[in-house]
Image (spheres, rainbow, N blue to C red):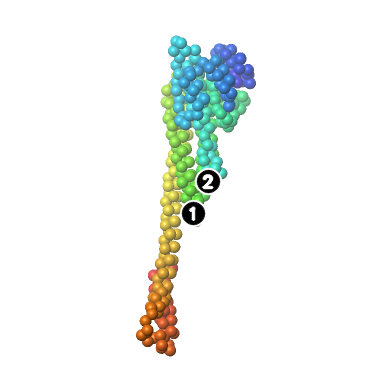
Amino acid sequence: MVFTTQGRLHSQNIEMFLMPTLLSDTNLFLWVDLEDPTPEEIRYVLEEVFHFHPLSIEDCVAVSESPKVEEYQPREEDRFAPYLFIVIHAVDYSRRDGVFATTELNFFLGKNFLVTFHRGPMRSVQLTEDRAIRGSGGIARAPDRVAYNLLDSIVDHYKPALDELSLEIAELEQQALQHPTKEVLTKILQTKKEVLHLRRIIGPQREVIARFAHGEFKLIRAHVVPYFRDVHDALFRITEMAQGYADSLTGILQVYLNMSSNQTGEVIKVLTLFTILTTPMMLVGTWYGMNFEPMPELHWTFGYALVTLLTVLATAGAFYYFKRKQWF
């Protein structure tokens, strides 16, 4: 897409062979969005049209786990214009899968151009493109404004993911209290792992956005810097939320362990009471199971009744004692 410096759409779906001509016009702003491009498209756009540095092209094509921003200034033998190379990650959370899915977005940001590169559809890119085409807010006046809107949209989409995670944590808390099973423990540990993964994503991205918020780059105009500062503040709030979720999951894990310990204690208590209550019967059985001939009560008319009565009284006495102690 090509926009005028007033933010109005000049042309859309341009042919690639026209890009060098449009790029040379300083009154136009060229935005090239490469969604899952072919190797030929990558080579032509990144190498032959914009002449980007080979290292940034290599980083763009390869999958990068860490967000970053690098500034490239041309030397005498270089053919490219000054630009920023940015790697950022969008995040989505699926309660069904219980994992955070990340999508990498690469920026090449110059004075009058912006090249975005991603391997699949991205809501943030599509929404920003729609706003730019409509001329909403004049976001397409310059590359730095479009870059801000892309980053702002990416950060905004963190919120629904965190809302889904919040619901998941609330359900886990109820399950830990009511049904502390091994499946619940597995879910708690998996969710905590994903929260830590989210924090590992957000942390480096805050550092990247902070460089824009501090006005470190000349390609970001001074009056646009406060907008990047707002994105940085939003990421800070998301970081705090993620930390709160991590703390909540630690508390839920402790609740689970306590409930499991209580259940184990209840089982041990029942087994102990059963053992104590059956001890009189086992003693009688053991005693009269011995093969001694001189046992007078064996030949006494009321011997069996007396032994049975003593066994019942001993068992009842033990039951009454533990009942008063509120063991059950």
Q: Position of residue 304 (x, y in %)?
A: 43, 84
Q: Nearer the viewer, residue 258 or 26?
A: 258
Q: Position of residue 163 (x, y in %)?
A: 52, 42
Q: Name the amino acid, label 2.
A: Leu
Residue 312 in the image: above or below residue 300: above
Q: Nearer the viewer, mark 1 or mark 2?
A: 1
Determine if residue 280 is in view.
no
From mark 1 to mark 2, how far is it between C-alphas?
Answer: 19 Å
Neighbor class of circle 2 (other Cα within 10 Å; few <14, some 14-19, many 20+) is: few
Residue 39 figure quarter = top right
Q: Residue furthest bottom?
A: 301
Q: Which residue is mark 2?
A: 167
- Helix, strand or loop for disc 1: loop
Type of amino acid at the residue the image marks with label 1: Thr
Relative to 78, say whether 194 is above or below: below
Where residue 116 appears, x then y in whole percent? 54, 24
Please name the residue shown 37% across and 81% down the image: 292
Q: What residue would you read off at disc 1?
A: 181
Residue at position x 48%, y 48% in the image: 186
Image quarter hosting the N terminus: top right
Q: Is residue 175 left or right of residue 131?
A: left
Position of the C terminus, as image quadrant, is: bottom left
